Image (cartoon, coloured by chain):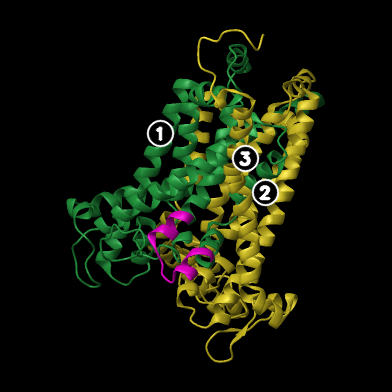
Amino acid sequence: MNRDLNLRRRYWRDRLMLLLLGIGTVLALLVLFLVMGYALVNGVAALNWDFFTKDMKPPGETGGGLRQAIVGTIIVDGLGLLLALPIGIAAGSLLAEYPDHPLTPPIRTLADTLNGMPAILKGLVVFVLIVKPMGTFSGFAGAVALGFIMVPIITRATEGVLTLVPKEIREAGLALGLPRWRVILSLILPAARAGIVTGVILAFARAAGEAAPLLFTSFGNPFLTTDPLKPMDTLPLRLFQFAISPYADWHRQAWAAGLVLFALIVLASALARWATRRRL
Amino acid sequence: MQQTAPSHHRRSLAYSASGDRVFSVIIALLASGVLILAVLMAWELYSGGADPIRRFGLLGFLTGTEWDPVIKKQFGAWPYVLGTILTSIGALLLSFFPALGAAIYAAEYAPRPVAVVINYLLDLTAAVPSVIYGLWGIFIMAPFLRDHFYLPTYLWAANHAPGLLPFLGNPSGYGLLTAILILAAMVVPFTAALARDAIALVPAPQREAAYALGATRWEVMQMAVLPLSRTGIIAGAFLALGRALGETMAVTMVIGNSHKLPYTLFGGAATMPSVIANEFTEAVEPLHLESLIALGFYLFIVALVLNIVGGLIIRRQAALARGVL
């Protein structure tokens, strides 16, 4: 009788904990659902064709779009990716393929540390290094700041994928008399391509949503420009400036920009998932 | 293999031993970009902020309560340091148990498809840009909290407990508590992901042994899983704290940006990243600019320590788990 009671109490405690875990899970994801829902509803209501085809209007005027920010985002993010790719992939290859290299342990630690550093600090550093000597904010400086964010992510992702490539592939290549560099370039990297692409997409998506490191590097520009040596607009930056402005029409466009950014992120992560599912 | 054997193809230099050497040098040079970025970051933040730190002292800069770039040209970082401590610790405390709950539920309880969805949503929470949280915070969350929570509480306190009013502060919706709440939602995935990893590292025989003793599912968690993954979970909390410290945009958008001490629960506040974001492009005075960079340097040091400690614990746990298996 007493034992029965004890057992029942333990079952009830188990159920109670399950309930608490469920509540915790719901709480943990609640804000995401709310943010997604509002971004979708308000964004769809605010989005129109002008958003993509017209530049922004001066304060107080309604209408216009954010073409200049979309073009700027593509240029700044693309340039940042070009800068980050060679460093990130080389570092990832070094970590995975040359575990005995003296640079391997410090680079692994520093890549993790850099990844955990606040993004705004990367903007500060680029300001001191590039904006100050050049005397002007520029899309290029913004690209360097975003590249700064992408490098450690690409490094660790590349390393992770390369270590998954079966050892036999390396041995087969070496047995054919190929030198190590040819094995890495022609066998290992191609075998890991899908996984590397995934890591690159995730790094790109992460950087594409950042506004903090762009505040004092690419700075923003209400006019369309394709010259990366001039201040350049990007969507996250413009979203921030519109959101804290007092104009209702700018608030509307901020929601539209939010939805476009959100769609970009979801698309990127879906693409990344799809790419890995096929290969690994 | 004879050196003199006739070769069917021309042996270029690239295929001799020196080819490998050249390649490893090239790859190491490119890879040292990571090294250079890290060193540059430390050095530029240090040298850029050296002047105010020298002028006000290493601790004096940190503990000075006056930040006046216009009249007195006095720079004390304490309001921002305090704001950063309050928001990030508050966010971590609020988010820790929900995040842990989600991780445990996904790892141990949920059927596989549900776990996949939860993990995907947690990843998505981390991937959503900070400005989008800020946008939602400004237009939806802050007004909602003001109308349904801050104002009623404030009015109730005004009638029944006027002693509380100085602690509650201006219930405008944009302030410390709003920033803590949004930050809590944003750091959930960092705690959860690392807790998930730590739980996954616990060897299956541990669980089986507990089940074999007749333990319920929660008792298995309590007896076998949590004690072994505790260190990893704590390391995750360290890293989440590092994220919370540096979070800029969403906090800047909802915290009300006031450095007037003392801070109140509902009233405006400011953090180190938020003041950098707000004042950096408007800082004309060199000392002002350098003080902001010095703030960045302190932020860098704290984030560095949290990351190194967290990373060390995680690596040690992973090595231990490999040993157990």
Q: Position of residue B2 (x, y in %)?
A: 66, 9
Q: Which residue was labeled with disc 1? A: A270
Q: Chain of mark 2?
A: B
Q: Which mark is residue B300?
A: none
Q: Is residue B33 above or below residue B171?
A: above
What is the tally of numbered marks visible in this picture? 3
Which range of residues does the magenta coloring cover?
A129-144
Please give the name of the residue rendered at 47% of the width and 21% of the height, measured from the top-left corner.
Answer: A279
- Cα separation between marks 1 and 3: 33 Å
Q: Which numbered disc, 2 or 3, marks the residue closer to the eye? A: 3
Q: Position of residue A92 (x, y in %)?
A: 58, 36
Q: Is residue A27 visible?
A: no
Q: Is residue B47 above or below residue A108?
A: below
Image quadrant where residue B191 sits: top right
Q: Nearer the viewer, residue A31 or B218?
A: A31
Q: Is residue B5 magenta?
A: no
SS label for mark 3: helix
Q: Chain of mark 3?
A: B
Q: Is residue A131 magenta?
A: yes
Q: Which residue was labeled with disc 3? A: B28
| Type of amino acid at the residue the image marks with label 3 | Ala
Q: Which residue was labeled with disc 2? A: B237
In the rendered image, residues at marks 1 and 3 fall on the same chain:
no
Q: Nearer the viewer, residue A189 or B137?
A: A189
Q: Colour of chain B?
A: yellow
Q: Position of residue B18 (x, y in %)?
A: 63, 29
